Amino acid sequence: MKTPRSLADLAFYGSLSPMTSSIEVDGDYDGLLISDEPSGNATFAEVAASGARFVECAITGLTFDGGTLRKSRMSDVWLGETRLVAVDLAESSLVDTWLSGCVLAGVQAFSTLLRRVSFRGCKLDSVNFRDATLTDVTFEDCVLRDADFAAARLTRVRFPGCTLTGAMFTKATCSSVDLRGASVGITAGYDALRGTTIDSVQLMALAPLLADHLGISVTDA
């Protein structure tokens, strides 16, 4: 499926129905528009919806403040202008899922499966992707601060136009990971960069850090 750039681009947009129920443990949600209407500022505080399943849904303008969506499953789901703060998404599965203009802060996403997922114009602060599996994932024009990819498996992951600050890749496995076009700030896991592609400008910026990591002394005296 072609990556949608707006809610109206969704192939299933015309068949969405407003959700009238709550989000619950092991809930099954199919073809729903879960939005901030009519309140205009809907907040789900301490949501308890582990094991929930979302198929061909759109989630827009919401704030999830705390709570758990652990082991939830999302397939063909759009999240737009949505905030997830201290939410537990661990061990969840996101397939053909698109996040646009979203904020993720303090989110636990360890051991998640992400396949064909797109983050566009998002802000990710202290998101824990430890031991996650990311395949065909794109972070586009995003800000990632203190993102933790330790022991994660990244395959065909791209970061065009992104800013990474304090990223950790300790014991990560990278295959066909493209960091070109990103501002890369890595604090741990330089040896895990094998399998990534960077440009010459990034190489010059990373060279002193790589040398220090390898115990290489660089001096012109």
Image (cartoon, helix red, strand yellow):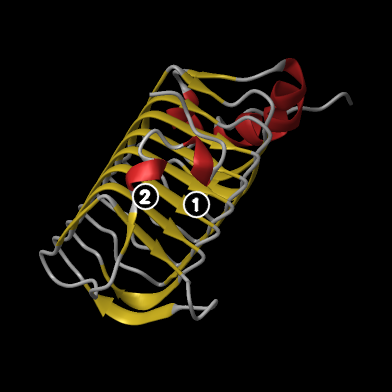
Question: Would you name the residue on which mark 2 appears?
Answer: 129
Query: In terms of image quadrants, where is residue 221?
Result: top right
Q: Going 64% across and 23% down the picture, which residue do you hit? A: 180
User: Residue 151's x, y, as percent?
Assistant: 31, 41
Q: Is residue 170 visible?
A: no
Task: Kindly report the distance in space between the C-alpha atoms of the residues bearing marks 2 and 1.
Answer: 7 Å
The answer to whether 159 appears left or right of 193 in the picture is right
The answer to whether 177 appears left or right of 111 in the picture is right
Task: Mark 2 and mark 1 in contact? Answer it, CB < 8 Å.
Answer: yes
Label 1 SS? loop
- Amino acid type at circle 1 is Ala
The answer to whether 5 appears left or right of 37 in the picture is right
- Amino acid type at circle 2 is Phe
Q: Mark number for residue 84?
A: none
Query: In terms of image quadrants, where is residue 21?
Result: bottom left
Q: Nearer the viewer, residue 218 or 173?
A: 173
Q: Mark number for residue 147?
A: 1
Query: Of the residues under marks 2 and 1, which one precedes in the sequence?
Result: 2
- Quarter of the picture containing the N terminus is top left
Q: How many marks?
A: 2
The answer to whether 86 appears left or right of 90 in the picture is right
Label 2 SS? loop
Q: Going 87% across and 23% down the picture, which residue do you hit? A: 220
Q: Is residue 141 visible?
A: yes
Q: Nearer the viewer, residue 210 or 36?
A: 36
User: Residue 73's x, y, as percent?
Assistant: 20, 50
**Within 10 angstroms of label 2, few (less than 14), some, or many (20 or more) residues?**
many
Q: Furthest residue to the front?
A: 14
Q: Going 59% across and 53% down the picture, which residue do you hit? A: 101
Q: Furthest residue to the left?
A: 26
